[in-house]
Amino acid sequence: MTLSKITLIGAGSTVFAQNILGDILSHAEFADCTISLQDIDGDRLSTSAIVAKRICETLSLPEVKIETTMDRRNALKNADFVFLMMQVGGYRPATVIDFEIPKKFGLRQTIADTLGIGGIFRALRTIPVLKAICDEMTELCPTALLLNYVNPMAMNCWAVSELAPHIQMVGLCHSVQHTAQHLADCLGENINDIDYLSAGINHVAFFTKFSKRHRDGKVEDLYPRLQALAASGEVPEDDRVRFDMLKRFGYFVTESSEHFSEYVPWYIKRDHPHLLDELNIALDEYPRRCESRIASWHSLRQALEGSEPLAVCRSDEYAAGILHSMVSGQSRVIYGNVKNKGLITNLPNNCIVEVPCHVDRNGIQPIVMGHLPPELAAVMRLSINVQELAVQAALTGRKSYIYQSAMLDPHTAAELSADQIVTMVDEMILAHGTMLPRFV
């Protein structure tokens, strides 16, 4: 396969675009590719273009062509790889609505981009845009690989798999590799000595294996040490939820404590506010991060567009490795979000699972994981129920599916009555206005 064009939709996410492009262009195989940057924000797009050109200068890549456009069709035409990295509705007004209206009803969230009422409405905003992108890809670049970084990961990938099953797609997250490094650090181990295996759904996957390879060839299961750490209580202050899950379910989950706390009904409780302090759960964490980033954007932009040399260091994102394997044939294993189709036998066939995948010139080849421990599959199905109905709401336009998705959401259902949920959903639909299609 010869790489000719890499398209970034939502390239105004400048820092993330910088990481992805730095990773890709640090491989010699991409020294003469075309990078097409697309966004609806012209100012941010121009900054991303400057950053892309500076990366090429740092890496001495004069043959790389950088093009920018606000026309998505132009960006997609003849693309070989398409990255999705946009946020439909932006922080204001969309994310603010996701937090402020539920808060009126006493429903508090931490991140609200994956599950919960915030995740549901983020999906409802995003899936119509994904449909348009899939239609355009079918016309303009039907053989391209779609690499999705947009949350809610599972809902978005599920919708694409229904809308355009002919499109090659993988959803990418960094929770598996980041958590593996985190656990190695907790145990004082070198990640290069660690073998691990994870399986599940995005943000609710668990390490089924976490072991150390000693120099004499002996393999040590590290779970007893992790369980001893959990029992001692001497765990990282910002990770008390996940270590509590380890004590109760026997396995470590891949997503951060602040994220995971809102995926289940046990940790954020109005009637038990002491849990927030005991488990160090930071409510409204995502809005705080957004406000901080917005406040610092001007100075960051000046630095990115400045005259100081721009360092290029490879990140641990999987994207560049996937492209490199498909171009060079070098085999590697990544963790990707793909349609289940029997990969995890005790989860629904049509859901999106996050599993190890072999990658080479033949593309993404998911690895069959078989039957997961039933207690872990049960926790995953709490999220899958919500995902399925939210996707159905987006695909059918039926408002009843929105109500039902929210009523089945573990955290929402633990805090609000059915009538409160319906009233809240109606208020959120009204507040979103034209950001949502019409539901009946």
Image (tube, grey):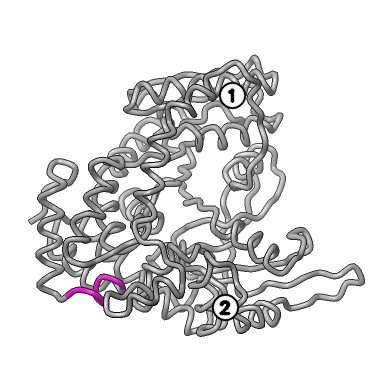
Camera-side residue of 91 and 172: 91
On screen, residue 88 above or below 58? below
Q: Mark 1: which amino acid?
A: Cys
Looking at marks 2 and 1 on the same chain, the residue that comes earlier in the sequence is marked by 1
For residue 9, say whether it is visible: no
Give the residue displayed 29% in from the left and 68% down from the top. Answer: 386
Q: CA distance from mark 2 to mark 1?
A: 43 Å
Q: Residue furthest right?
A: 216
Above or below 331: residue 200: below
The rendered magenta stretch, by its main secondary structure, is classed as: helix
Left or right of 237? Residue 330 is right
Query: What is the total number of numbered labels drawn onto the structure image?
Result: 2
Task: Return the residue at label 2.
Answer: 251
Say if mark 2 contacts mark 1, CB within 8 Å: no
Q: Nearer the viewer, mark 2 or mark 1?
A: 2
Secondary structure category for the residue under label 2:
loop
Where is residue 86? Give x, y as percent: 37, 39
In terms of secondary structure, where does tag 1 sit? loop
**Is residue 414 in the magenta section?**
yes
Q: Local crowd at mark 1 within 10 Å, few (<14), some, or many (≥20)?
A: some
Say which quadrant the N terminus sits in.
top right
Which mark, by number, is residue 62? none
User: Measured from the top left, where is residue 118 in percent x and y?
Assistant: 28, 57
Q: Nearer the viewer, residue 434 or 243?
A: 243
Horizontal and vertical percent position of residue 91? 30, 42
Q: Residue 433, how many percent across, how many down?
A: 12, 44
Tell whether position 160 is magenta. Answer: no
Q: How many C-alpha atoms fall within 10 Å of the one at disc 2: few (<14), some, or many (≥20)?
A: many
The residue that disc 1 covers is 33
Give the magenta range. 411-416
Q: Quadrant of residue 274?
A: bottom left
